[in-house]
Amino acid sequence: MAEPPSMAVAGTATGSEAVARRRRELAFLAAIQVLLLGAWLDRPLHVDDPLFVWTAQHLLRDPLDFYGFDVNWYGQAEPMYQVTQNPPLACYWLAAFGACFGWGERVLHLAMWIPALAATAGAYRLAERWCRTPLAAALGALLTPAMLVSSTTLMCDLPLLALWTWAIYFWVVGCDTGSTWRLILAALLGALASLTKYFGICLLPLMLVYACWPAAEKRHLASRSLALAMFVAPLVVYQLTTRQWYGVGLLSEAGQYAADWSGHARSLPAQTIVALAMLGGCLPSAAFLAWFLLSRTQLLAAALGCLAAALVGAMFAGRFWPDARDLPLAPALLGVQLGTFAALGLGTLALALAEFRASRDRQTLLLLLWVLGTFVFAGFVNWTSNARSLLPLAPALGILLARRLERRSLATLPWAPWIAAAALALLVTWADYEQAKSARTAATALASRFGRSGTLWYQGHWGFQYYLDRRGARHTDRHGVTIARGDVLFIPTNNTNVEAGLPFDTTFETLARFDAPVAPAAAAMWMNVCGFYSSDYGPLPYVLGDVGPDAYFVVRAKADYRFELPVRGGLRRAATTTPRRSQ
C-alpha cells in the first residue's frame, strides 16, 4: 500500500492542491477500510442478519409485500412485520445483489462494503468543511469497534450511517450556500435513511436546528420548508401504507415497542452506567488520543478518574453479576472493565460539551446535539443499549476530535494512536467473527452427526437457526409441535429465546455436548456478561478475556413430547385489525 498521507495540522490548502489532497486521503481511507474488512469477508450470518436476508429473498418473490411472510424468531411462528423493528430499504439493497450474484456470504458482505465506504467518505467530506484535518476526523470514526464490527454485518446500520452522513453534508452545504437542490437532496437522503432504520427520523430535528440557528438566519426559508416537507412526506406514506397492508402502522409500532421495553430491566443509575459503558467501549477514539487532547494536568485527572471508576466497578460488580457461578471471568475483573468503559463514555460526552463551550457556533451546536441525542436515544429510549444504536454519532465524534486536536496547535499527529485504536477494533471484530463462525460450525457438525437420528429439532436463533434451517432441521414452536420418540433436539447455551424446563428426568436424555471454539481473548455477545448487540445479554459492550467455548447440548426424546408453552406476555403485540395482505 502506498505511503499514508501526512497528518499535518497545517492551514487549509486551496484550489487544485486541496482537490489532490482530498483524492489522496479518500483513496487512503478506502484502502484502509478494504484492508480491515477483507479478513471478514466470509463471516457467517450472525445475530439479526438472517432477518434481513430472509426479507431480501422474499422480496424477489413479492417486491411490494416486503413483510408478507411468517418467521419463527421468538419461539413461535409470527408475521414478519411483528418480528422486525426495522423498515425494509436495506433488504431491497441485499435483494438486488442476491438476485444478480447469489446468496453466498461473500456476495452479501461485498454489497455492504459500498455503504461502509460511502459512510467514511461522507464523514470526510463533512469534516472537510469544519476542520483542517478531515483525515483525522474520518479515522476517528472508522477505527472503532462500533464501525468496524457493524461493517461486517448484513443489517441496516451501515446503510443508515451512509445516508445519514451524506444527508447532513448536503443539508449543511445547502444552508450555507442557499442551494435549493442540495437542500432537497439532503431531505430525500434523510427520508431514505428513515426508511432504512427508523432512527433516521432523528435527522429532522438536527436539520431544523441548523436551518434556524442563529435566530437571525431568515434566508431561504421557503426552500428549507419545502425540503423538510419532502423529508416527512415519504414517512407519512409509509405509515399509512403499512397500516393498510398489515393492520398496523409500522413506524408508530416501532416507537411503541421501544417505549414499552426501554429500561425495563434496570434502574436508572444502572441504565446510565451501561449506556456510558456502551459509548466508551464502542467508540473509544478519545481515549487513544488523550495524550494529545489534554494538558498534563487534565491527563493526570483523567487517568485518576478512570482508575477510580475501575475500582468502583470492581467493588460494585455484584450489583450487575450477583451470581458468579456461571460466569467465565471473575466479577471483579468484569467490574473493572465496566467502570473503565463508563469513564471513557463520560469523557466522550465531556469532549462534546467542551468543544461547544469553546466555539458556540451552529456547527458545534449541531455536533453536540448529534452526540447527545444519539446517546440519549441509544441509552434510554431504545428498547436496549447497543453499539448499533450508537453508530450514527461516530462521524460527529471524529470531527470533534479533529477540532480539539487543532486547538492544541500540534504540528503533526503520530500514527501510534490510530494503530492502537485499529488493534482494539480488530480484536472485537475478530471476537464477533469467531462467535458467528462457531454457530455455523456447530450447526453443520451437529446436523451431519445426528442427521440419521429421526427428525432434527433445535432451539435458539441467530446464525444457528439460519444454518440449521438450510440442513432441514425444524424449530420448536410454542403453538404446539410434537417431538416424537427418538427425535433429537439441539440446545445452545449462548443464544436467544432458549426455553428452559424440559423434563429431562422423564422424557429427554442427554446424548452429547458439542463445544465450538471462539476467540480466546475477547467476546462480543456472552450471556449475562456482554451484549455488543443488546445490553439485555450483559452490561458490557464486549469483554476482554477468555470466556471459553460456545456449548451446545444434544438431547433425545425417550417418549413423545408435546412442545407447547404459554406465550410470554408483552413479547409482541398483535395487530389491531386484520392485515389486508395476509387475507
Image: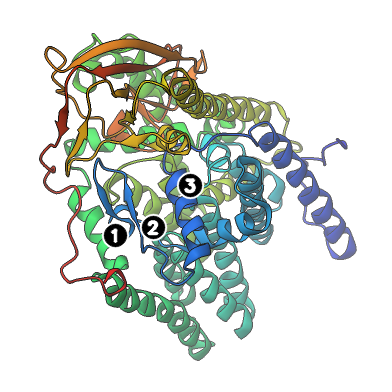
Residue 129's spot in the image, x, y percent? 66, 62
Is the C-beta separation of discs 2 and 1 under 8 Å?
Answer: yes
In the displayed structure, would residue 561 be above or below residue 545?
A: below
In the rendered structure, find residue 254 and report the number of the disc placed on it: 1
From the viewer's perspective, tell me whether residue 47 is left or right of residue 105. Answer: left
Which residue is label 3 attached to?
Answer: 391
Is the C-beta separation of discs 3 and 2 under 8 Å?
Answer: no
In terms of sequence position, does the residue under pointer 3 or pointer 1 come before the other?
1
Query: Toward which corner of the image does residue 86 lie, by quadrant?
Result: bottom left
Q: Is residue 361 visible?
A: no
Query: Toward which corner of the image does residue 34 lie, by quadrant?
Result: top right
- Give whichever of 191, 62 is nearer the camera: 62
Residue drawn at point x = 26 percent, y = 30 percent: 498
Q: Amino acid at mark 2?
A: Asn
In the displayed structure, would residue 361 be above or below residue 414?
A: below
Give the distance between the C-alpha atoms of the residues marked 3 and 2, in whole angstroms: 16 Å
Crowdedness of circle 1 by 10 Å Cα count: few (<14), some, many (20+)?
some
- Give whichever of 544, 66 is nearer the camera: 66
Q: Amino acid at mark 1?
A: Ala
- Secondary structure state at the residue bearing disc 1: helix
Q: Amino acid at mark 3?
A: Leu
Give the number of the mark in front: 3 or 1: 1
Give the distance between the C-alpha atoms of the residues marked 2 and 1, in whole angstroms: 8 Å
In terms of sequence position, does the residue under pointer 3 or pointer 2 come before the other?
2
Give the distance between the C-alpha atoms of the residues marked 3 and 1, in whole angstroms: 19 Å
- Give whichever of 235, 53 is nearer the camera: 53
Which residue is label 2 attached to?
Answer: 86
Query: Toward which corner of the image does residue 64 lie, by quadrant?
Result: bottom left
Count of picture labels: 3
